[in-house]
Image (cartoon, rainbow, N blue to C red):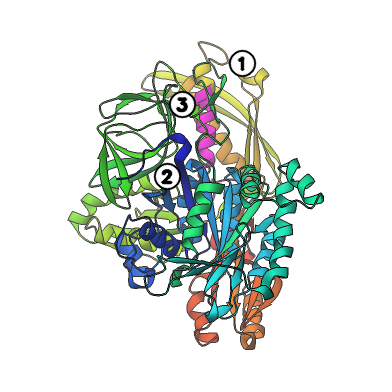
Amino acid sequence: MPPATTPETLRNIGIISHIDAGKTTVSERILFYTGEIHKMGEVHDGMAAMDWMNQEQDRGITITATSNRCYWNAFTINLIDTPGHIDFTIEVERSLRALDGAVAIFSAVEGVQPQSESVWRQADRYHVPRFCLINKMDRIGADFRATLRDMEVKLHARPVLLQLPLGVEDHFTGVIDLLTEQVLRFSEGDQGRTLHSEPIPAERLEEVREAREKIVEAAADFDDGILNDFLDGNTIEGSRLLAALRKGTIACQIYPVLLGSALRNKGIQPLLDAVCSLLPSPLDIPAAEAVDPTSGASRQVTTDDKGPLCALAFKVLADEGRKLTYLRIYSGSLSPGDTVWNSTSQQNEKVARLFRMHSHKRERIDRASAGDIVTATGLKQVLTGDTICHETEPLQLAGLEYPEPVVSLAVEPKTVDDRDKLLPTLEKLQWEDPTFLVKEDTDTGQTLLTGMGELHLEVVIERLRSDFGVNVITGRPQVVYRETISRKVTIEERFDKEIEGKLHQAEITLSLSPLPRRTGLQLNLPADVMDPLPEHLRLQLEEQLRNACHSGAVSGYPLTDMQVDVAAIPYEPGRTSEPGLIAAATKALSDGVRKASPTLLEPIMLLELTAPPDYTGRVMGTLQQKRGQIEGVESRPGQDVIRGTIPLFEMFGYMTELRSATKGQGSFTMEFSHFDQAPTETLQRFGL
């Protein structure tokens, strides 16, 4: 019988890390030791409970964030395992938006890797408290102190080590708990279920004393009494230190660190204890910021069952043609049959059923309370990032930020039957993933899919075939560029045309100016120009200009790093035609871009490549030939780590080339950095 769940005993946590650092292996052990599953599956066997999709099992990676509920002692844990591959970063983004805490996992061999840095930044953005597990302590080359230094240098974090290892590499058998000052050994005979507590060996006592003093120093920043007792030479109990460390963790000022080897079933029970003792409950986190959409007034949403309903739809799945919506309830409660208000789309919806998720399996529930994470069916119009509330007490939470999709792929249906199913199926996949875009190429009539990378689009194609029975012919992956301008222009446009017997007239003057790289698009509609227009026309004009910037005048790629100023609109009620003004604005923008020396920007990627030292020189030479900029080389046991930036265009098919050059021993990861000037040959290809 699970313990009663209250907001005080609830922990909404995520597991985050670089790919292959051990997230899913840790999650699998958590489910096993908490009794949620009775047999541990392994990622390399395709049998992990959290990796339930066919594509995850085939590839041995996590693709979609998966939720599970489990219990540890008196606590309830909503656990979300997130992907580590950069192509599926949206899953991390939306999970962190809904969570109260996280466990960041690092490899003791590789240290802080690129995607670790990326997810850490995401967690920083949402102020998610977290502690860390340095995993793979049993591996050759394991160096937890190097990983601690990585955290300080690369993450600008303040790690606080709570354990010391017992044995190194393949002799790693347990840890020394610096708070309780006890040795913890994990039984080999029962899959690590049994922990043996022992006194600390005499030869390690001085090392433990020094390490514990560092914990005291960190804890003293959050409890003045600890510092006074330490200076007076008094004994400080582990429970007092833990309480102070919890304050610092929840404030995101310190990051406690544990050690373990998940694959060898070592270190998971202390991790579960830390989830309960260090990470916040829904009551411990700051109130969610919301606005009243009717008045614009700011509102603070606290965890309160009796408060107004306020929930975030942080994920939507296409489940047998229907939407399954993941909700984080910040305030109020929810029951099947409730009519709710989607304040984002401004419409009523009805909750059909509520579920608690156990990976992809569902448990029906009759009520969901403030602080909880559940799923709902019946919300037909909801999209990721929407706010669910009551129409009588409307609230609007901040939405989600989505990264830039940088790779596109043309697809065509194989058969007439496939053609009929293709677009409706792609629409369902777009429900699930805001970083997956679909549009029609007006020149070729082909359907263009745009995503975060080659793997992202490969998974989409596989899902079309295996999950929905839609077969397509695919083209080669293409880079998604951006269009911008090189000089300032001012352009006047007059629309004067008779349509269906009615004369439409309008005039507008636009000024287009180039902006520095990474500035984005800026639209300036001065009040003195816009105020004479009716409100609905002002809104319509702004929307049309923004939409027109989504497709550049020369290449069709979105416009960026450009400012659009509406300089003049000679508006005369009764004479100025509203359709005419929209048409004039669209043509002025298009003609202005053509006259402003348009150019293309290409996506530049952050690159981290690992290879044996014997091949480093050859690999660096190849990268430089591909216009790569080498920023540094770090030597690790048995391998060199090359970091730099490189145009995405140069990296299509490079994995095969790298493996050939390094006899299968090289690998690399990339993540989007920024857009920069495309080379002359690319511009010529587009007639620029």
- Viewer-proximal residue among 132 and 126: 132
Q: Amino acid at mark 3?
A: Asp
Q: Amino acid at mark 2?
A: Ala
Image height of 200 relative to 425, above or below:
below
Label 1's element? loop
How far apart are labels 3 and 2 at the CA level?
21 Å
In terms of sequence position, does the residue under pointer 2 or pointer 1 come before the other? 2
Q: Position of residue 89 (x, y in %)?
A: 49, 54
* Residue identified by numbered label 1: 531
Taking 149 as reference, is 272 left or right?
left
In terms of sequence position, does the residue under pointer 3 or pointer 2 come before the other? 2
User: Which callout, 3 or 2, points to the residue nearer the camera?
Assistant: 2
Label 3's element? loop
In terms of sequence position, does the residue under pointer 1 or pointer 3 come before the other? 3
How far apart are labels 1 and 3 at the CA level?
43 Å
Residue range corresponding to the magenta coloring = 539-560
* Residue identified by numbered label 3: 304
Image height of 442 relative to 190, above or below:
above
Image height of 320 relative to 347, above or below:
below
Q: Residue at x 45, y 55 (%)?
A: 82
